């Protein structure tokens, strides 16, 4: 036995070892021919992304997302339910609610009295879309809009819901939609960031908006959203410090870039390369941003279109106007947030002010893009993170009520960017509680938006921590019914 | 061992004879059902003779001639031959039985049958006579090789029957996936229906198998139908046989594809149904169907929406070289040869940059020059951009003269001219552009009547003339009084601004509303030297005047030597204690901002030591109203004065008027005269409301007082 083992050992001489090895390597090499990605043969999806080009010819080149933060009440704006007015004060039938989970704010209520809207609705445009009298300007452009009445989400509180809409996941740290687009398509104008963020606040009950919503997540930091603020410094830390002129800045940046480059060559950390790019972008933005943010040169007719508030920095109207200018200037994704829609109580009082803030300028933005020939290539989205309940939160009176969070159905509208104009998609039941036709999940919404931008949501991926990530994660279907 | 060999050889011989017999009387015999079971095992067994005979041939081929080879080695090869011969004969017999079940088309079957039989006979024959050829290497090696060729041929014919024609070679045949078919060229049948039939139906319904006498390989064959009749009824498509078969539950025997085979997906069923519903045309393009139909939408996701162009892509290096931070050139999409070009930054533009694009003039389909100082002289250059489809010239220096040179752009579909000086007659000159569909002429000065004339002249073109305010008058936004410093020591100049150009700002200093005629017009600043309420209103022709804005400016000309709080404020709202009272910082409307001192229940007692700076005029107390938040005007403010803290005289007791309803949140000021004599100390005794009034939601609870500043003049 021992002798055999010894012989076996002696048999393993170098020649045998090498010839066996060559066989082994040969077979691996042959096998590798079948796995194109293994040694980067052919073009992998990652490589295609590196080109930062649309997968197919895009309908939309840019997006302006008018986020109505806090969740506007679809039942008082778009989803007209006469049944609720008829049954005002009666309890929501359990057959409709079906044990739907509620927020901690109303789960303790012993009754869920239905609250019919106190606002009048009329039908507008070729789609005969119902729109509340609160939004006269929006109503007047109904033929440009596609109302999706059947969008739904799983999240029931603001932060997860908002994060879900922005990043495709309810927990933070995933890249925001704008970051994904920046990653997939790059910047159109090399002198502006691909992803800009504008904030405004209404007088209604507000909810927080945090920078995690425009994060680059695990993508390179160049894809992060850049927040524009309303003061004299629209982009913080962009101006030269006192006593430094542009030439000096250039010189300083050149030296800094040389140092960074040296570091990059040594360590190869892509974040260093990103840093160099960001400094250069900031330098170019020093001239491009003031030109863009100067609203004073807008003609008077534009001011009349957006409403006089558009001249007051920091208002929603001003942000709409700025959004048009940024978009026109080649910013891929302009994200607006308007806070104040979270009307748990005194909804009729709060919603009037909120609508006044956003109605005219939202409509004006769509029409302004149109008259410049930009609406075809710009997708405008208007909507919140979820809807509001058909039953009253707190005390219900004849003309006053509050509404809690409702994730099961709500309405958003989209315009331009290859979305069918003048249509209503999806339907809810007569209580406005459940979807009865064509449900659109947040993932589907994302897939559709990416599709309009010429991106296949299943191909826009990023490998991180050993897993491939997508904006739509493992779900999402393009909503073909709303594509023109 | 020898006995076993003999047994197998005999068995083989027996089956061969049986096979020959049945072949001879093929047309006369019928397979009994119990034999069908045996026949159906043909696909299982047939792999044995293939493997055995091939390995046998291989062994024979690589070994030395049989005569010289060691006995045991050649023996082993012979055993393989024997077993191969036996299984070949058995397989052929089973196959023959199976073929009698019917449903197989002639052609491949005939070849397969005779091929299989030949293998059985030949292998047995060779086993018997192989030794006689031992000394003729050509025969002893050639015949096994020939046998392998025969096995390959017969096997291939068999595979054709089971898996369909060309099963093996299909993956390397020209690509049949239609991913790259442009949407505009996709034919419903060729590109959507036929691939489904091929994948899911033609395995059985091909001209070889023709199950149910149905062949789906050609339009003619499909139209001919099968033994159960035509596949669809063009008058009543819903009752069509084909639809019935694919929609039946899978467990029903008539369901197609049969249970166990790969089923149609929902989308595939939808495609077939929509195709039949639409008349089952073999030539209609998808693009010809209605866009809201499922077929159109499925096709949109399936086919390449990127328009295909005839021209070749530009050299990527050239494109790269032409790209700059201000001139972005990129393909329309991955793998598209078409390019879009966008110019940014008016300052960085020079006409040469446009000229440089001539190198890629064939590929440019979209050119955006919005807000770029392009002039008429630059446009003739674009004539050579023959494939240009979209041209954006908003807010450029283009006039009718430049427009004339665009009349030769024979592919132009969209032209943006908003904010330029073009006229209707200039646009009329573009009649030759038959492909033109959209023209944007907002802000050009083209009148509505001219637009309707243009619409008549260009029936295929939509003219977008954009927003027209139609003389609507709206209200100006309110002006902004700059600065938060409501308190000042030395005279100041107050600035007012408005964000719209050409607005007249009028103001008053007495709290009254400014009027559009008499009130002074704001120029550079409003000089103030005492407590003043600045009220401003904006006016502009063609607009309603703005709402009134006012702001109080309070002077504090005297600074005390020291201040002390005799009663401490509530620990939650202690601000900067006594320092807050003379820091000239106005608290905001938010009482927690750190500038406010809050008192509840206890009065606020403050002692102010004046030294030599004795105020002669007035004292002002700055407080906050937030009645909803229990912050009320003080109940009373008493003022004491004297030469030192021990000798104080009461100067005035002041009761403060209380509101009868909620007040808006905001500042409130209480000003009182001071004695006209010499004194060194002032003391204030400010009493909060003890009980909130009856109208208040929280009536009966103690009210708050918030103070942020005391001003002496």
Image (tube, rainbow, N blue to C red):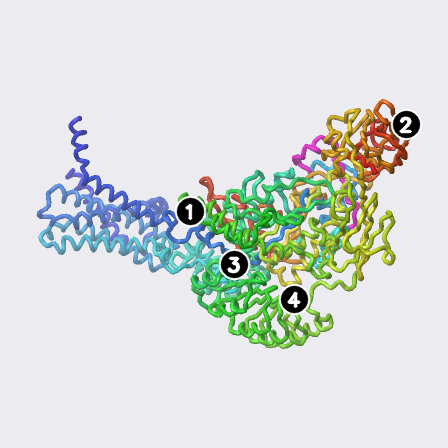
The percent coordinates of residue B614 (x first, y second) are 84, 34
* Residue bearing mark 3: B325
Closer mark to the observer between disc 3 and disc 4: 3
Residue A114: in magenta span: yes
* Disc 2 and disc 3 in contact, CB within 8 angstroms: no
Of the pair B324 and A210, the residue shown nearer to us: B324
Dot 2, crowdedness within 10 Å: few (<14), some or many (≥20)?
few
Q: Position of residue B160 (x, y in %)?
A: 35, 55
Label at residue B418: 4
Distance in Å between CA atoms under marks 2 and 3: 76 Å
Secondary structure mostly taken by the magenta-highlighted segment of the chain: loop
- Segment colored magenta: A97-123
Same chain shared by disc 3 and disc 1: no
Q: Are marks 1 and 2 in contact (CB under 8 Å)?
A: no
Q: Position of residue B157 (x, y in %)?
A: 32, 56
Task: State whether discs 2 and 4 lie on one chain.
Answer: yes
Q: Residue at x 84, y 28 (%)?
A: B683
Name the quarter where the C terminus of chain A is drawn. bottom right
Give the mark nearest the N terminus, 3 or 4: 3
Q: Are marks 3 and 4 on the same chain?
A: yes
| Element type at mark 3 | loop
Which residue in the protein does label 2 denote?
B650
Dot 2 or dot 4: first in sequence order is 4
| CA distance separating discs 1 and 2 | 78 Å
Q: Mark 2, mark 4: which one is toward the viewer?
A: 2
């Amino acid at each position: 036995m021992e002798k055999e083992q010894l012989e076996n050992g002696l048999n393993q001489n170098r020649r045998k070892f090498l010839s066996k090895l060559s066989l082994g390597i040969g077979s691996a090499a042959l096998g590798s021919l079948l796995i194109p990605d293994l040694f980067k043969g052919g073009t992998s999806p990652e490589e295609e992304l590196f080109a930062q080009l649309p997968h197919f010819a895009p309908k939309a080149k840019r997006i302006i997302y008018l986020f109505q933060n806090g969740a506007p009440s679809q039942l008082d704006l778009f989803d007209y339910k006469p049944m609720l007015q008829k049954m005002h004060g009666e309890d929501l039938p359990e057959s409709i609610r079906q044990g739907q989970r509620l927020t901690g704010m109303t789960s303790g209520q012993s009754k869920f009295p239905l609250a019919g809207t106190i606002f009048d609705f009329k039908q507008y445009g070729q789609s005969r879309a119902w729109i509340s009298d609160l939004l006269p300007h929006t109503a007047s452009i109904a033929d440009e809009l596609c109302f999706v009445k059947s969008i739904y989400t799983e999240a029931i509180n603001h932060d997860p819901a908002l994060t879900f809409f922005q990043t495709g996941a309810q927990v933070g740290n995933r890249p925001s939609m704008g970051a994904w687009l920046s990653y997939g398509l790059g910047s159109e104008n090399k002198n502006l960031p691909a992803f800009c963020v504008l904030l405004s606040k209404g007088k209604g009950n507000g909810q927080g908006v945090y920078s995690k919503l425009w994060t680059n997540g695990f993508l390179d930091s160049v894809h992060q959203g850049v927040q524009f603020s309303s003061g004299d410094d629209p982009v913080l830390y962009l101006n030269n410090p006192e006593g430094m002129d542009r030439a000096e800045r250039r010189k300083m940046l050149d030296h800094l870039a040389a140092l960074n480059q040296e570091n990059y060559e040594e360590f190869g950390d892509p974040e260093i390369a990103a840093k160099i790019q960001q400094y250069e972008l900031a330098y170019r933005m020093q001239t491009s941003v003031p030109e863009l943010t100067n609203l004073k040169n807008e003609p008077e007719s534009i001011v009349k279109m957006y409403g006089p508030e558009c001249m007051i920095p920091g208002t929603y109207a001003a942000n709409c106007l700025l959004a048009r200018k940024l978009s026109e200037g080649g910013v891929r994704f302009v994200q607006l947030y308007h806070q104040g829609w979270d009307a748990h109580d005194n909804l009729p009082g709060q919603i009037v002010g909120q609508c006044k803030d956003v109605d005219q300028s939202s409509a004006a933005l769509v029409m302004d893009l149109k008259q410049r020939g930009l609406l075809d290539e710009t997708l405008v989205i208007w909507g919140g993170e979820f809807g509001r309940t058909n039953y009253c939160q707190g005390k219900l009176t004849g003309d006053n009520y509050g509404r809690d969070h409702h994730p099961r159905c709500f309405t958003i509208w989209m315009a331009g960017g290859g979305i069918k104009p003048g249509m209503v998609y999806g339907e809810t039941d007569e209580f406005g509680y459940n979807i009865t036709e064509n449900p659109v999940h947040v993932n589907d919404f994302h897939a559709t938006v990416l599709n309009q931008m010429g991106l296949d949501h299943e191909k826009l991926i990023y490998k991180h921590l050993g897993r491939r990530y997508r904006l739509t994660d493992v779900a999402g279907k393009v909503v073909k019914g709303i594509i023109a | 061992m020898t006995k076993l060999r003999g047994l197998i050889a005999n068995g083989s011989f027996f089956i061969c004879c049986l096979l020959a017999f049945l072949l001879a009387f093929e047309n006369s015999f019928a397979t009994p059902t119990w034999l069908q079971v045996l026949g159906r095992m043909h696909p299982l067994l047939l792999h044995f003779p293939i493997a055995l005979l091939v390995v046998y041939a291989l062994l024979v081929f690589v070994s030395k001639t049989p005569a010289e080879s060691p006995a045991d080695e050649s023996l082993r090869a012979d055993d393989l031959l024997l077993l191969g011969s036996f299984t070949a004969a058995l397989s052929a017999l089973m196959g023959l039985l199976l073929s009698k079940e019917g449903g197989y088309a002639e052609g491949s079957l005939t070849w397969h049958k005779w091929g299989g039989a030949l293998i059985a006979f030949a292998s047995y024959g060779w086993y018997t006579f192989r030794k006689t050829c031992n000394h003729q290497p050509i025969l002893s090696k050639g015949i096994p090789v020939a046998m392998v060729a025969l096995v390959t041929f017969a096997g291939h014919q068999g595979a054709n029957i089971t898996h369909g024609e060309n099963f093996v070679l299909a993956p390397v045949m020209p690509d049949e996936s239609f991913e790259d078919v442009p949407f505009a060229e996709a034919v419903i049948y060729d590109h959507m229906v036929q691939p489904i039939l091929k994948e899911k139906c033609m395995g059985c319904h091909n001209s070889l198998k023709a199950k149910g006498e149905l062949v789906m390989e050609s339009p003619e064959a499909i139209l001919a139908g099968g033994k159960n009749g035509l596949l669809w009824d063009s008058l009543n498509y819903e009752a069509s046989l084909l639809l019935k078969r694919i929609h039946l539950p899978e467990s029903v025997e008539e369901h197609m594809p049969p249970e166990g085979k790969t089923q149609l997906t929902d989308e595939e069923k939808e495609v077939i149904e929509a195709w039949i519903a639409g008349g089952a045309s073999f030539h209609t393009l998808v693009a010809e169907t209605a866009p809201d139909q499922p077929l159109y939408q499925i096709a949109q996701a399936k086919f390449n929406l990127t328009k295909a162009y005839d021209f070749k892509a530009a050299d990527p290096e050239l494109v790269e070289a032409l790209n700059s931070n201000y001139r972005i050139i990129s393909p329309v999409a991955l793998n598209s040869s078409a390019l879009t070009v966008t110019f940014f930054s008016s300052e960085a533009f020079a006409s040469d940059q446009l000229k440089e694009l001539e190198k890629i003039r064939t590929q440019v389909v979209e050119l955006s020059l919005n807000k770029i100082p392009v002039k008429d002289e630059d446009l003739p250059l674009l004539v050579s951009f023959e494939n240009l489809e979209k041209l954006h010239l908003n807010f450029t220096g283009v006039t009718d003269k430049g427009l004339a040179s665009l009349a030769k752009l024979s592919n132009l579909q969209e032209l943006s001219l908003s904010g330029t000086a073009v006229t209707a007659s200039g646009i009329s000159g573009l009649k030759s552009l038959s492909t033109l569909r959209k023209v944007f002429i907002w802000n050009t000065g083209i009148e509505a009547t001219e637009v309707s004339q243009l619409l008549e002249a260009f029936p295929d073109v939509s003219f977008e003339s954009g927003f027209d305010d139609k003389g609507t008058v709206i209200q100006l936004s309110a002006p902004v009084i700059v600065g938060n410093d409501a308190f000042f020591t030395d005279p100041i100049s107050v600035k007012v601004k408005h964000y719209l150009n050409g607005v007249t700002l009028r103001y008053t200093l007495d709290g009254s509303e400014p009027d559009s005629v008499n009130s002074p017009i704001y120029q550079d600043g409003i000089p103030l030297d005492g407590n003043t309420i600045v009220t401003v209103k904006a006016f502009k022709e063609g607009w309603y005047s703005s709402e009134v804005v006012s702001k109080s400016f309070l002077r504090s000309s005297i600074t005390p030597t020291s201040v002390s709080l005799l009663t401490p404020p509530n620990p939650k709202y202690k601000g900067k204690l006594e320092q807050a009272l003379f820091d000239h910082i106005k608290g905001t409307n938010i009482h927690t901002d750190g500038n406010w001192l809050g008192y509840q229940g206890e009065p606020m007692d403050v002692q102010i030591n004046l030294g030599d700076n004795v105020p002669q005029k007035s004292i002002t107390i700055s407080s906050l109203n937030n009645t909803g938040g229990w912050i009320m005007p003080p109940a009373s403010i008493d003022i004491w004065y004297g030469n030192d803290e021990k000798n104080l005289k009461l100067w005035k007791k002041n009761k403060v008027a209380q509101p009868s309803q909620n007040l808006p949140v905001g500042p409130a000021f209480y000003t009182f005269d001071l004695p006209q004599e010499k004194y060194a100390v002032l003391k204030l005794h400010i009493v909060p409301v003890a009980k909130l009034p009856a109208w208040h939601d929280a009536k009966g609870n103690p009210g708050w007082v918030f103070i942020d500043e005391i001003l002496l003049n």
